[in-house]
Amino acid sequence: MFAQGTKLIVIPPDRSLNVDISPKPTTFLPSVTERELHQAGTYLCLLEDFFPDVIKIDWREKDDKTNLASQQGDTVKTNNTYMKFSWLTVSGASMDKEHKCIVKHEWNKGGVDQEILFPPQKKDLTAINSTKASLRYKDDTLQLQFKTTSALYTYLLLLFKSLIYSVIVAICLLGRPAFCGNGKST
């Protein structure tokens, strides 16, 4: 009947296949910090809202047929569909090349594999972006320090104010008979 490795998927009768159940990709590019600190970059491809859960993801350089070593997360069920992510870490000269994530799924549009292109991470662009990022980081640090110092002084002022009010209330409550005349209360 079925050979080893065959998977039979039974679709519930209330489930319509008229909707698009092909994988919907979301891509993430390497961060400036990662490129600067590690001289490497990680491309991430998140595939969502597909059914069934059988999917194959490969990574290649744009004009090459050789699959690259990549990592993949588990296929996770979300409501009635599935999601999966895969990532490729490149370094050195590979940073200047275009890469693609190839998604094989039976419900891909037109029955062809999806090819999701990732642009090269040019070194000169990295230098410009890292300068902006480091300036922004310094500005963020100064702003955070200013906010923290302002909050500290505000809380100290409120604490001092509460202490003064407590002393005034204590004097009024404990010293009240003295203010009412001869220490006698009526």
Image: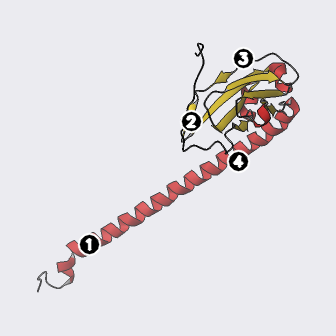
Residue nearest the observer in this picture, 184 or 76: 76
> Which sits earlier in the primary sequence, circle 1 or circle 2?
2
Residue nearest the observer in this picture, 41 or 76: 76
Q: Which residue is mark 2?
A: 11
CA distance separating discs 2 and 3: 34 Å
Mark 1: which secondary structure? helix
Does the residue at mark 1 contact the one at mark 3 (Cβ under 8 Å)?
Answer: no
Amino acid marked by disc 4:
Asp
Specify the label residue 92 is tagged with: none
Amino acid marked by disc 1:
Ile
CA distance separating discs 4 and 2: 55 Å
Q: Which residue is mark 1?
A: 171
> Which sits earlier in the primary sequence, circle 4 or circle 2?
2
Residue 48 x, y percent position in the rendering: 65, 38
In the rendered picture of this protein, how many numbered marks are placed on residues? 4
Q: Which residue is mark 3?
A: 69
Which quadrant of the view contains residue 182?
bottom left
Specify the label residue 139 is tagged with: 4
Residue 17 x, y percent position in the rendering: 64, 42
Other residues around mark 3 within 10 Å, as few (<14) / some (14–19) / many (≥20): few
Residue nearest the observer in this picture, 143 or 116: 116
Mark 3: which secondary structure? loop
Amino acid marked by disc 2:
Ile
Amino acid marked by disc 3:
Ala
- Disc 2 versus disc 3: nearer the observer: 2
Q: Taking 76 as reference, is 171 left or right?
A: left
